[in-house]
């Protein structure tokens, strides 16, 4: 498969970003190729297009499948296994957040809960125990929030994110503007929210 310069640049950059996120470069490049192409590809075509070994593609595909980022599909008239990635960027984001939460956040939450339930937690003093408890509370709060966001459909999630940006602007604007009366403030808040929630 021939790749344009822009496609090559996207794939190479995605590979570099993958290494910064703790993902193998080839794994990230294969995902970028499948996302950008938007159609199922066989492993040998992936290998030829990216110029990597077939065994490397096989290992990378296995890792992407473990992350639920790639799935195996079959193409009529072709006996080879093909692989495809979701082209819905919001669904892709949901999958990455969900997987990272299960692999990174939940083990930390479990460990902190275990520490706080251990009788020896107080041997290091109340302050240290409180620091552990504060970290657990923060992670649990963020997890509950992210779970609620992941349940929203894309249209609603987009509105919520835009609303958050509007609220930030509103707060920053109030910090520099002259204090408003409670009545004016309430009216302004309702107007700002209506402009986001409305059509």
Image: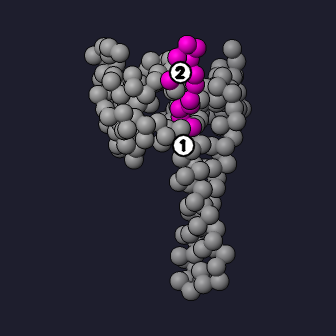
- Residue 195 horizontal/vertical position (percent): 65, 20
- Residue 12 horizontal/vertical position (percent): 31, 29
Task: Report the predominant secondary structure element of the magenta stretch.
Answer: strand
Give yes or no for residue 95 being in the magenta stretch: no
Viewport quadrant of the C terminus: top right
For numbered disc 1, what is the local secondary structure? helix
Chain part drawn in magenta = 67-80
| Residue shown at 37% from the left, 38% from the top | 55
Tell me if I can see residue 17 in this picture: no
The mark that comes first in sequence, 1 or 2, is 1
Tell me if I can see residue 55 in this picture: yes
| Residue shown at 41% from the left, 30% from the top | 30
| Residue shown at 35% from the left, 28% from the top | 47
| Residue shown at 56% from the left, 61% from the top | 108
For residue 66, which numbered disc appears in the image?
1
Q: How many marks?
A: 2
* 48 to the left or right of 95: left
Vertically, is 132 above or below 169? below
- Residue 171 horizontal/vertical position (percent): 55, 36
For numbered disc 2, what is the local secondary structure? strand
Give yes or no for residue 70 being in the magenta stretch: yes
Viewport quadrant of the N terminus: top left
* 119 to the left or right of 71: right
Alpha-carbon span between mark 1 and mark 2: 23 Å
- Residue 109 horizontal/vertical position (percent): 60, 61
Q: Nearer the viewer, mark 1 or mark 2?
A: 2
- Please name the residue that numbered disc 2 is placed on: 79
């Amino acid at each position: 498969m021939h790749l344009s310069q822009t496609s090559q640049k996207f794939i190479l950059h995605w590979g570099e970003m993958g290494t910064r996120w703790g993902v193998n470069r080839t794994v990230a490049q294969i995902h970028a190729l499948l996302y950008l192409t938007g159609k199922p590809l066989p492993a040998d075509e992936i290998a030829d297009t990216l110029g990597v070994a077939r065994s490397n593609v096989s290992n990378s595909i296995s890792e992407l499948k473990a992350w639920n980022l790639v799935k195996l599909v079959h193409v009529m008239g072709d006996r080879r296994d093909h692989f495809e990635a979701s082209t819905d960027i919001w669904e892709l984001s949901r999958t990455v957040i969900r997987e990272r939460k299960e692999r990174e956040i939940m083990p930390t939450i479990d460990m902190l809960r275990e520490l706080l339930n251990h009788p020896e937690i107080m041997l290091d003093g109340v302050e240290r125990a409180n620091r552990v408890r504060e970290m657990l509370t923060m992670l649990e709060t963020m997890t509950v929030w992210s779970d609620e966001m992941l349940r929203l459909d894309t249209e609603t999630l987009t509105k919520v994110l835009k609303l958050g940006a509007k609220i930030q602007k509103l707060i920053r604007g109030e910090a520099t503007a002259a204090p408003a009366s409670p009545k004016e403030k309430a009216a302004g808040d309702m107007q700002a929210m209506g402009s986001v929630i409305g059509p």
